[in-house]
């Protein structure tokens, strides 16, 4: 999943980038509201974390611009402690959730998980469930018919994306756009390698190849 972090406080941004990276997210970081207004509207993000006190252009104005343009990407706003008016204004402007600074990293992680699942019409349960698989995002492993299977970091990122989009045809280029940040080299052949690794661990029927189109996640039959 590819996230945009818009935060001008560098120490906090560094901490969040490291934590989100360990959780398997590809994260782009911006510190200026003007840059965020453009990039958030033009790049295919799965979720945006937005601080409201930004240089260049206030976060609230950026959010209003995105929603006025029809951007439906989930947005989690960060606000100062006790600033209830900011939180209300943010929700009115179209934010999906908010988090008050300072916050515990695990709370941010859980709120991100909940927003991503809600965006795909899924219940917010302890594990991500789709097509007979249960994915433990905290431990980055998957259970299939009661059997727990370890995953590499890359396999986990790819399987999580498939499980949030069951039954959809996903091209290699689409997957690369959502699994890597803007600075990473995107090699579609690497996607194919990780798909084959998942098939060996979960069964070939789990991920179907659609020639000339990409892949479709089916999960487990029976």
Image (cartoon, helix red, strand yellow):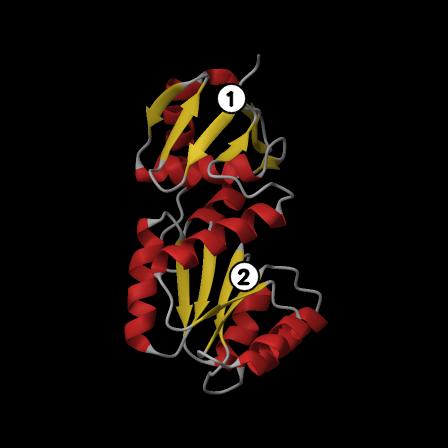
For mark 2, what is the residue?
43
The correct choice, above or below, for 192 with respect to 98 in the image is: above
Mark 1 — residue?
A: 206
59 to 17, vertically: above or below: below
Q: Extreme top residue here?
A: 222
Whole-percent x and y of residue 99? 48, 67
Q: In the rendering, at what x and y percent does residue 55 appear? A: 45, 87
Q: Is residue 139 left or right of residue 70?
A: left
Circle 1 or circle 2, nearest the eye: 1
Tell me how far mark 1 sits from mark 2, CA to CA. Answer: 29 Å
In-front residue for pair 51/217: 51
- Which residue is pictured at 32% across the width and 39% down the height? 153
For residue 181, say whether it is visible. Answer: no
Residue farthest along the bottom direction in this orientation: 56
Q: Secondary structure at mark 2?
A: loop
Q: Quadrant of residue 64?
A: bottom right
Tell me if 147 is positioned left or right of 115 in this view.
Answer: left
- Disc 1 crowd, CA 10 A, few/some/many (<14, 14-19, 20+): many
Tell whether 87 sits left or right of 55: right
């Amino acid at each position: 999943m590819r996230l945009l972090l818009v935060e001008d406080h560098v120490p906090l941004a560094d901490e969040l980038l490291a934590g989100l990276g360990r959780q398997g997210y590809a994260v782009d970081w911006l510190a200026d509201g003007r840059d965020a207004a453009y990039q958030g509207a033009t790049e295919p993000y799965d979720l945006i974390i937005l601080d409201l006190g930004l240089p260049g252009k206030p976060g609230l104005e950026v959010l209003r611009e995105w929603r006025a343009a029809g951007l439906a990407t989930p947005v989690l706003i960060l606000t100062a402690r006790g600033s209830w008016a900011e939180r209300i204004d943010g929700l009115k402007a179209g934010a999906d959730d908010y988090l008050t600074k300072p916050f515990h990293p695990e709370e941010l992680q859980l709120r991100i998980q909940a927003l991503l699942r809600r965006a795909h019409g899924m219940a917010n349960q302890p594990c991500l469930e789709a097509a007979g698989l249960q994915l433990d995002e905290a431990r980055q492993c998957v259970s299939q018919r009661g059997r727990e299977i370890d995953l590499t970091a890359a396999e986990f990122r790819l399987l999580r994306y498939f499980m949030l989009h069951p039954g959809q045809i996903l091209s290699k280029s689409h997957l690369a756009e959502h699994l890597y940040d803007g600075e990473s080299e995107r090699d579609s052949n690497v996607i194919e390698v990780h798909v084959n690794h998942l098939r060996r661990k979960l069964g070939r029927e789990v991920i179907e190849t659609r020639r000339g189109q990409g892949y479709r996640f089916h999960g487990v039959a029976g």
